[in-house]
Image (cartoon, rainbow, N blue to C red):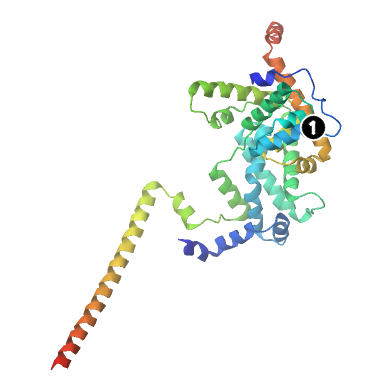
Amino acid sequence: MKNITLRNPLVKRAKAFKALEDIELVDLAKAGDKDAFGELYERYMEKIYSYIYYRTGNHHDAEDLTARVFYRAMGHIETYTERGVPFQAWLYRIAHNLIANWHRDRGRRKIIALDEFIAVNLKSDAPDRQAEENEERETLINAVRRLPEERQQLLTLKFVDHLSNADIGVIMNRTEGAIKSLYHRTLIALRDDLTESNTPSNDNIKSKKG
Amino acid sequence: MTTMMNSSSSTGNSGNGDFPIEAYLSSVTDAVIVGRNIPSSWAKRYDLSPSEAASWLALIRGLSGALVLVKPSKTYAESLKRDLIGRVDRTMVERVRQLPPRVQIAATLAVAAGLWLLARRRYATLAATVEGVTDENAADIGILAQ
């Protein structure tokens, strides 16, 4: 079976691409090599999709915007120059701009249920424990979604895409130190929000107001 | 979540100048994300009380468990790639896996039957050759005996 695979020139080429750096693939893509762009797509599509999903809250818009990101990247790849902004960061910036437009067009607040996500990602065997974990996770995600836009972006890049502070800094156009500081403030805000929402007296006040 | 709520009143500015709380939180987050152990000495190093360190850790672990990679469907991923670059490169195994289970079984049986026929034919040829050689040897021995 190995011989059959290696005889396929397309597969052989795809394997060769895997060894190349992003910038080498970008150069090939600029020269019109669609397969090189295909490799870049393979490398980043899931991350970009996930990033958009957390920022929009549904698969439908995540699919639509992910497609737009890659179409835009492919259409403008000739204008891309590294200059301290890696290709990955460039993609995230495109995604960020499209998401910003998406929110602006809809004029909606970014609190959107992620119910599918909650159900899909739970991995507990005991039903009781599962329900408890589910509830905790939902509370936490709702608190995340109440955060300002840039803080949500930071948490998504850090926890979902596993990017370093330096990489996040490039994407968000900030220094590494500024990202660390923003992360600290984000965690404090999140902790305060969770404390507030778990305080019975606050619940009573809220229900009286409501 | 309960542990998260048991945090101290500190806003986290308890770290000293060399090791500020920002650095502590970043280090702990990196360790949680890659699944590394977090030594208890870190909290002391950053001048945090054990309860405060535990509350941060619980919050960070909660985030790590909640914010996970969400994958699109394979159909969507392949369809978009096809639209972008015109084709999707797949190995033979991947192509077979895309087929319906009944077709996969039929294909496997057909390949197995083909291999069996080839092996059988080769064995028959080999047996005939060996038989021929044996007959020739017997004839030679007969001639010599005469």
Between residues B78 and A164, which one lies in front from this camera angle?
Answer: A164
Q: Residue at x 28, y 67 (%)?
A: B120
Residue farthest toward the top in the current orientation of the protein: A208
In the image, is residue A128 above or below residue A75?
A: above
Residue farthest toward the right in the current orientation of the protein: B17
Q: Position of residue A139 (x, y in %)?
A: 64, 22
Disc 1 sits on a residue from what chain? B
In the image, is residue B135 above or below residue A113?
A: below
Quadrant holding the N terminus of chain A = bottom left
Residue farthest toward the bottom in the current orientation of the protein: B146
Using residue B98 as the reference point, say whether residue A180 is left or right of it: right
Q: Residue at x 62, y 32 (%)?
A: A58
Q: In what element is the residue under mark 1?
A: helix
Using residue B48 as the reference point, say whether residue B31 is left or right of it: left
Q: Position of residue A197 (x, y in %)?
A: 69, 16
Q: Amino acid at mark 1?
A: Glu
Q: Which residue is mark 1?
A: B22
Using residue A210 as the reference point, say whether residue B45 is left or right of it: right
Quadrant holding the C terminus of chain A = top right
Q: Position of residue A138 (x, y in %)?
A: 62, 24
